[in-house]
Amino acid sequence: MSDGRLVIGNRRYSSWSLRGWMAVRLAGLKVTVTTIPMTRVDGAGATPAIKAVAPAGLVPFLEHQGALVWESLAICEYCAELAPALWPADRAARGTLRSIATEMHGGFLPLRRAFPMNLGARASTAVRDARMSAEIAADLTRIAALWAQAIALTGGPFLNGAAPGAADAMYAPVVNRIHGWNLTLPPAASAYVEALLAHPAMREWQADADAEPAEWILPHYEAMISDEQLR
Ligand SMILES: N[C@@H](CCC(=O)N[C@@H](CS)C(=O)NCC(=O)O)C(=O)O
């Protein structure tokens, strides 16, 4: 029996949906997942069907046992109340991991704008290099430092420790972007990328993304990652 529903956008593109879904999946909530294909993925709230159901006009949106929860980080916190292991048990480590997760929620705009998540394509190094900037390099340096800090605190291989948690949910789309856009990171950060990509929850999301109907493809995002843009 289902305890509610999680509304998400296309798994191929919707990075915020992945964050909310990961938290729900890691916490083991029994909800029905409803996917609403988006008309764009820049958070503009342009999809009428999403506007019609979600309080802020955006996905992810969780309804669980009467609770209405939106904003991916709030969904992480809600899930962690039901499954406390989504944050480290140690108070000091938990405080730092929360900061690391929140820095993702509010930051890294240059990286997010230039390299949107697209689970159906891999960029050539030429396409990647054409979109690279000093600001994005700084974002990547900061992200690698945050991951190293988290893993030093929790023991890894995930940010949360032996199993992924809320902070990993918040960085899951970054991991997909790094893979899909062929971005280069120091070896320790690359090892984290590999570890999270291999996790069953990430594989499940990717498989479901691969199964989405062709009509849900958004040409704008496909053109961005294709070599066509260099011609
Ligand atoms: N701050 C929000 C961001 C949510 C957001 O921007 N979601 C995008 C999809 S990735 C969306 O709902 N877009 C719908 C649309 O543009 O119609 C969160 O953390 O959940």
Image (cartoon, rainbow, N blue to C red):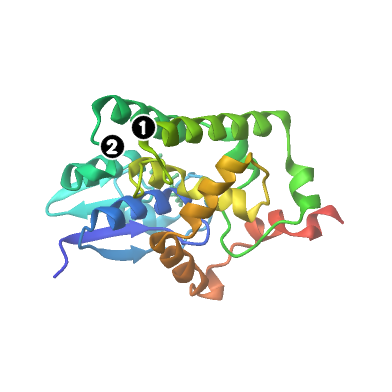
Q: Is mark 1 within 8 Å of ligand 1?
A: no
Q: Quadrant of residue 224?
A: bottom right
Hey, what amino acid is under mark 2? Answer: Pro
Q: Which secondary structure lies at badge 1? A: helix
Q: Quadrant of residue 160?
A: top left
Q: Are marks 2 and 1 in contact (CB under 8 Å)?
A: yes
Q: Quadrant of residue 185?
A: top right
Which residue in the structure is indicated by mark 2? Answer: 88
Give above or below for 16 relative to 39: above
As drawn, the label of residue 97 is 1
Tag in front: 2 or 1: 2
Residue 206 visible in rendering? yes
State the residue lying farthest toward the right.
231
Q: Which secondary structure lies at badge 2? A: loop
Question: How far across and how far down the image is residue 35, in percent?
Answer: 38, 64
- State the residue at coordinates (52%, 62%): 12
Along the line of sight, the residue nearer the viewer: 161 or 51: 161
Crowd around label 1: few <14 · some 14–19 · many ≥20 (10 Å): many
**Image-based side of 134 in relation to 50, left or right:** right
- State the residue at coordinates (59%, 46%): 190
Quadrant where the image shows the C terminus: bottom right
Hey, what amino acid is under mark 1? Answer: Leu
Residue 14 visible in rendering? no
